[in-house]
Amino acid sequence: MPGNFAPFEEKMRADGLGDAAVAAFSAAYGALTSGATGMIPEADLTPASGVPKLDDVTAKPVDAALLGKTVVLKLNGGLGTSMGLDYAKSLLKVKGADTFLDLTAKQIMAMRAELNTKVRFVLMNSFATSADTMAFFKENYPVLYADPDLEFVQNKVPKISRDDFTPALWPAKPSVEWCPPGHGDLYAALLGSGKLDSLLAQGCKYLFVSNSDNLGATLDTKLLSYFAASGAPFMMECCERTANDKKGGHLAVRAKDGQLVLREAAQCPDADEAAFQDVSKHRYFNTNNLWIDLVALKALMAATGGIVPLPMIKNKKTVDPKDDASTPVFQLETAMGAAIECFKGASAIVVPRTRFAPVKKCNDLLLLRSDAYACVGSVPVLAEGVPAAPQIDLDSKKYKLVQQLEARLVGGAAPSLKKCTKLTVKGDVRLSSKNVFVGACTVKNESGEPKTLPPGTYENTTVDLTAAPGLGPLKVTSLKTAPIAGQKPGTSGLRKKTAVFVDGLYLHNFVQATFDALKATGADLECQTLLVGGDGRYYNDKAINVITKIALANGVR
């Protein structure tokens, strides 16, 4: 199979990437060009069994010395694009006025105060999240911001042309030639940034890693004490799988040597899908809450050429994700949890489901913002009297993006879900804090216009709003038009007498031309905010009405 890594190394070094990043990507590229598929067949595995439960183990109370050797690290590289965000996902408000990072920062500061120990806190940001995140800490948590170890930045890697295994090129938009290498980049980024050596030099030994959107992943002192006493170099927190978890990666044992391994969905051959999804066979999934002995990590990387030899995961994409006709590429990534197979003596522990509470969809966000959850010590927990989190199933087309969810919450507040067991919403439905759901409820709207659920308590019922009064459908109408002599962009084109503006489609032409120009630059208008202002003179109200209508027709929401 073809393969020449030299052009990749040249490209990476030209962009400022260091030895650790190059070595890690070289290993993944070598696996790809050697014909490795990254697949883990069912025949190579046996189910993991006998994994201890946190509730059943004992551990000594932690002391200041142990906490002084501990580091809390949050993975903070995601933009949350799948939810419609173009900024760090961790800056999304999740409970009241608090963002993910607010709650995490408050947890760290509270623990420092309570235990009178400087519990270290580190973020692995990406090039896309670093500036926003650091500005947030500078403004809101200057004590944490002042720590020189607060952040390091994960790497990026080139996309690979599927045709000839060369670096993919897309001159029209060079930024899409790069992709994130997955959270398995944690190890290369720790080493390459100098952060690993810095933490070791400060006497740190135990690293607790979790995703920034998992608010259940707090520094649990019992887990810390148990991990430190076990002497294991690596420990994965797992939860017991249910039918809802069948498509996620699972823990297993490699048959040939008894080593614990993690198998992700992308590593499962199609023929083994049924076994992969059998939750009675493969009983545990990875929460991505990991405990790592930094001394052991340093020793492993020193013995393996500066890398953690993680299994390669191969994804087939196009170089421009928004252009299906662009160059077909491979994107290589690794999973940080897969390091469990690289450490001899690695272990796992089953933790309560409360330690796995990520926000991946608007379903999760609505639930967290509702009264089904309360914050106790800056940790979201089920509110008093709520035995289990209700299941939320929002229409995937109407509630996919955060902006769509917020537009459908009248007054910006979530409905009451404290007594709800399951809420299903089908179609374009507006909800409010005056809606109280009890038991299993379904609200549907099969019409083509939005409908608002009236205030009230709904218990174990289905509400059909299809025939209910609505706001009237906002249908897009296309009008024929033609260039207008003398009309120019900029304010000079608008310095006309009112009589000119009200004549025919003069203003309409100008506004549509503006949106056409924005689209030509590649601007994504959907779910963006349009700010319209004026000086209060005659015709402003009519002009704003025209502008708003044309904006809606062009996708501004």
Image: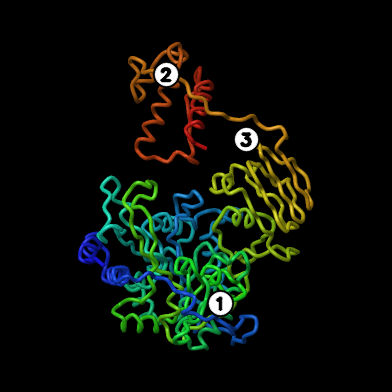
Tell me, for residue 220, which label it has, or none: none
Q: Nearer the viewer, residue 103 or 13?
A: 13
The amino acid type of the residue labelled 2 equals: Thr
Cα–Cα span, label 2 and label 1: 71 Å
Label 2 vs label 1, nearer the camera: 2
Q: How dense is the environment of label 3, judged by Cα within 10 Å: few (below 14), some, or many (20 and up)?
A: some
Residue corresponding to mark 3 = 448
Q: Which residue is pictured at 39% across the width and 61% down the height? A: 315
The amino acid type of the residue labelled 1 equals: Leu
Residue 239, x across and y down, in percent: 59, 73
Quadrant of the rendered image containing residue 150: bottom left
Residue corresponding to mark 1 = 115
Query: Mark 2 touching mark 3, by CB under 8 A?
Result: no
Q: How dense is the environment of label 2, judged by Cα within 10 Å: few (below 14), some, or many (20 and up)?
A: few
Cα–Cα span, label 2 and label 3: 28 Å
* Residue 193 seen from this side: no
> Quadrant where the N terminus lies?
bottom left
The amino acid type of the residue labelled 3 equals: Gly
Quadrant of the rendered image containing residue 95: bottom right
Residue 137, x across and y down, in percent: 45, 59
Q: Nearer the viewer, residue 295 or 553?
A: 553
* Mark 2 or 3, nearer chain start: 3
* Residue 391 seen from this side: yes
Residue corresponding to mark 2 = 481
Q: Which residue is pictured at 21% across the width and 62% down the height? A: 7
As helix, strand or loop, the secondary structure at mark 2 comes to: loop
Residue 538, x across and y down, in percent: 50, 17
* Mark 3 or 1, nearer chain start: 1
Label 2 vs label 3, nearer the camera: 3
Cα–Cα span, label 3 and label 1: 57 Å
